[in-house]
Amino acid sequence: MSDQSSQPIVEQPESKPSKGPWVLAAVALIVSVAVGGYGWQQIHGMTQQVQQLSEQNAQLQSTLSSAQTTAAKQAAQLRAQLAQNQQDLKTQSSQSRIVLSQMQNTTQALKQQLANLNIHDLNQWRLYEAQYLVHLAARKAWLEGDITSAIALLKSADKGIAQLHDPKYIPLRRALADDINQLDSLPKVDIEGIMIQINSLREQIAHLSLTRVNLPKVSDAAVPSEQKPSWKTRLADSWHKFINQFVTVRRRDSDTKPLLAPEKAWYLKQNLQLQLQQAALAAGNHQSKLYKQSLTQASQWLSQYFTHNPAAEHLVNAIAQLQKQSVAAVKPGQLNSVELIDKAVDQISQQDSSKEEAK
């Protein structure tokens, strides 16, 4: 008993609890918070992108609707203006027919006068023939605007008078030379050729194709990396794969334009053809302002809706060349040879009358 009581009592050290599980829990909590925050940022960003795309789509639909309304109004205005131009053309054609009828009556009277004349002198016949040619040249120049034919007729008349070999007709030949130079100095306007070219362009409008938007291809495959990804990269990839099962957002940075529906494209082509038809009518009526306005509008529509189209670029270039040509009416001055040759014929007629009376 005494031995046991005399032995010292040894205190056992108290065991401390392990901190390992708490550290792992803290790390897991931090990772969860980080993953949750990153995922919330991604979802928030994707939501904003989807909202922006929706707003852009709505804006494009509004722009397309406005363009369609404007195109319909312009088509109605063009049809009304075209109808008015056709009415004006009919009125001018009626007036031209009246003047032409008067000129034809005058020409017929001259022919009848020539038929009734008892001409025994070849020189008299040549003078009467020259008078007919000069009057016909005046009609070509003033009424029909055919300057080339008028010049040819005046040259023929001068050739006939030259064969008379009479010095008293030198003032008449000088007047003919002045009239020929006057007509030759006028600008040559081939209205018929311009109208034919415009009508040829109108036929090409139906074969045009609208601009196609070529979007860049989007690759969904991940780019392989030679380095071993970290745990953060693997965590982000896992999160993206999880999100992509529900929402897929592809970013496109290229500018896109709304394509017209087929029926709207048909209206656009009809408006283009109306503009070119209006330009052709304006050229025939020598309306320079309307002619250039119609060609300018057609060129703008071609450049706007048919970009990167070789056929459309050819039409734009052809229209640009047509815009440089003038369709203003060429009005020649008074042909002095008309008055002089009438006086010469009157003198011959008076001489013949005096001879008949003397007999």
Image (cartoon, grey):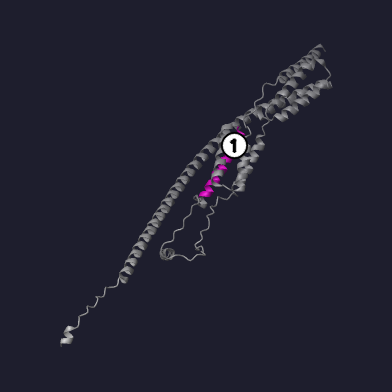
Range drawn in magenta: 264-285
Going by the image, does 118 lie left or right of 36?
Answer: right
The part of the image, by quadrant, that contains residue 51 is bottom left
Relative height, residue 192 to residue 338 (above, below): below
Mark yes or no: residue 116 visible.
no
Q: Amino acid at mark 1?
A: Leu
In reply to whether residue 278 is colored magenta, the answer given is yes
- Residue, far top: 358
- Crowding at mark 1 (Cα within 10 Å: few <14, some 14-19, many 20+): many
Going by the image, does 24 lie left or right of 173?
Answer: left
Percent across and percent down for residue 40 are 36, 59
Main SS of the magenta part reads helix
Going by the image, does 359 lie left or right of 283?
Answer: right
Relative height, residue 15 to residue 171 (above, below): below
Mark yes or no: residue 247 visible.
yes
In reply to whether residue 333 is colored magenta, the answer given is no
Q: Name the one closer to the observer, 321 or 164.
A: 321
Disc 1 target residue: 281
Q: Residue at x 51, y 38 (%)?
A: 80
Q: Name the one closer to the observer, 355 or 153.
A: 153
Percent across and percent down for residue 64 are 46, 48
Q: Name the one closer to the observer, 244 or 129.
A: 244
Percent across and percent down for residue 131 are 75, 22
Relative height, residue 298 to residue 97 (above, below): below
Percent across and percent down for residue 143 are 66, 28
Kind of element beneath mark 1: helix
Q: Name the one closer to the observer, 106 or 153.
A: 153
